[in-house]
Amino acid sequence: MLSFVRRFNISLFKKIITLFLIVLAPIFILGIYIRNWGANTVREELSKSSTAQIEFYLNQLEDEIERLKILQYSCLNDEHLNRLAVQYSIMSPYDIVSNMRQLQARLMTIVYSSSYVENVSAHIFSIDKTVSSDRGVDEIDPKVYERIKAAAGLKGAQIIRYEDGLYLTTAYPLDNSGQNSNYVIEVKLNPEVFKEDLKQFNIYPDSGSFLIDLTNSNEIAMASTGRSLQPHDILSDFAISGKSGTDLGKIDDYRYYSVYARSDYLSLLLRYLPENLVFTPMQNFTSWIWIFILVSITVVIIFTLFMHRFINKPIKNLVAVFRQVEKGNLQISLNPEDVRSTEFAYLYTRFNKMVESLNMLIDQAYKQKILTQRAELKQLQAQIKPHFLYNSFFIINTMAQMGDENLVEFTNHLGEYYRYLTRNSTDIIPLCEEVEHARTYTSIQTMRFSKNLEVDFSPCPEEFEQYPVPRLIIQPLIENAFEHAVDKRMKDRIISISFEICQDRLHIIVEDNGKSLTDETLEELQNRLAVQSDDVEVTALLNINRRLQLQYDEASGVLLKRSSLGGLRAELVLGVRRG
């Protein structure tokens, strides 16, 4: 039953671990996977959304700048501009004014066509005049030549920055140096419009946007909210390749997330924003994942505590009481009211019933065994008493026939002998009384074998005088020595009775110097003591051996050896008395 409970407990623990591995481990793995997948998805979607937004704006801006360039080129072929550049010296004042107004009207049309245009000017070098959409006719500003030189060799949109102004310049003939040009159409762009466009990307605090012409190393426009960064600080953190991309960077204590889109015409639009704001949704998602994991762990802990209280703890109590039962403690019980589970309450109740039944069965078996041992003991002792009585009658008969003068003393010893047997009904007596009884018997036998007989009877050890022993365990061995050894030897007959203490056990040794004991007889006697079969005739030696084992333990009994005197050595081993 205990092994079953242990197996059940181990099986339950394995089931809990298996449940944890099968149910919660996949949940944890799935949670981590969802977190990583969500983070990557948010990052990809944010990158796609941001790059798509700035790419859309960059494409629109490209179209707008390209349209302005087309208007510039078409304006180079304006007839009024050509007349002024070629025929100015032969034209009347009326024609000059008329053509200049027509040219100004053409330039104003370009201004009104786009919100990005602040002013459009036609610089006519042959007459040293500038016709602009907002100021009319002026002398050519010398800075015009510098702006034209700055635009020399430019590619793409050819937007140049000069003294915080943005310009688109187209010369005729197409000599960007301006030295051989007849006239130039110059569009001045409005930087504030670019800034307003870039502000639409700055929806977060401490964010900003740049429109940069990397080909010509011009910063076209910049807009920021709170935190202003320089374009070269950001561009130095990563190499721009491809049409668009994203990157994470850090300047001092400011961590930013940058998004860029690139075109071959306008080059680059760069946007940066704080990393913590960008990844706030992802951080919230991560927080929910951790909340999910913590809730799962809490559920596992609650489940484990529940299992411990309602299953594991009752099982431990069962194992503990079963261990007590294993140690022989049958006065233990369990209270079914200590558990709430009806199944364990049933097990507790059945355990109490089992212990009660074991107590009853053990009590019955113990009493039955005691009664059986007493009955067998009485039977064995009854066997001994008639046996000695018969021998005593034969001795008295012999002494009477021989007229032995020791007959009176012999009968007195015999009376003391039987008085010892009848005065106390108990089966267990002190060792000193058993030794004294054996001395009385030896005296009786000495009177019979008075000639050529030496009896050496050692005194009983004082510490074992009150040692409880069964009745009639020494006298039968002495009787056996007289009957089978000394009686058949006519002279120099010796009997020795001694006591030895070995490993807290008392050994009572009876030896003789008889010559009739053969090795075959000794071996047969030893085998009969070892087998102790119920169908074997119970002799005195077998009688004593069984009584000692019943009284003490299996290590007690009779040991038979060949004596150093030459005869039989019968050794009684007395063990610890059974409680």
Image (cartoon, rainbow, N blue to C red):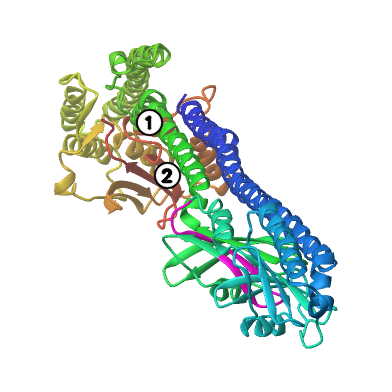
Quadrant for the C terminus, please. top left
Quarter-of-image position of residue 376? top left
Residue span colored magenta: 204-221
Quarter-of-image position of residue 257? bottom right
At numbered mark 1, what does the secondary structure look like: helix, strand or loop?
Answer: helix
Q: Residue at x 57, y 33 (%)?
A: 23
Q: Position of residue 349 (x, y in %)?
A: 36, 12
Q: Position of residue 470 (x, y in %)?
A: 27, 30
Q: Amino acid at mark 1?
A: Leu
Q: Amino acid at mark 2?
A: Leu
Q: Position of residue 338 (x, y in %)?
A: 29, 18
Q: Which residue is mark 1?
A: 305
Of residues 160 and 501, the one nearer the viewer is: 160
Q: Residue at x 61, y 49 (%)?
A: 46
At numbered mark 2, what does the secondary structure look like: helix, strand or loop?
Answer: strand
Earlier residue among tags 1 and 2: 1
Q: Position of residue 288 (x, y in %)?
A: 47, 39
| Residue 390 visible (yes or no) | yes
Q: Which residue is mark 2?
A: 559
Q: Is residue 521 above or below residue 397?
A: below
How many angstroms separate mark 1 from mark 2 (CA)? Answer: 63 Å
Q: Residue at x 83, y 71 (%)?
A: 83
Q: Is residue 84 above or below residue 259?
A: below
| Left/right of residue 81 with respect to residue 498 in the rendered view | right
| Left/right of residue 389 with respect to residue 79 in the rendered view | left
Circle 2: is it few (<14), some (14-19), or many (20+) Cα within 10 Å?
some
Q: Is residue 205 magenta?
A: yes
Q: Is residue 479 magenta?
A: no
Contact between labelled residues 2 and 1, with CB atoms less than 8 Å apart:
no
Of residues 100 and 326, the one nearer the viewer is: 100
Q: Is residue 465 above or below residue 52?
A: above
| Left/right of residue 148 with respect to residue 228 in the rendered view | right
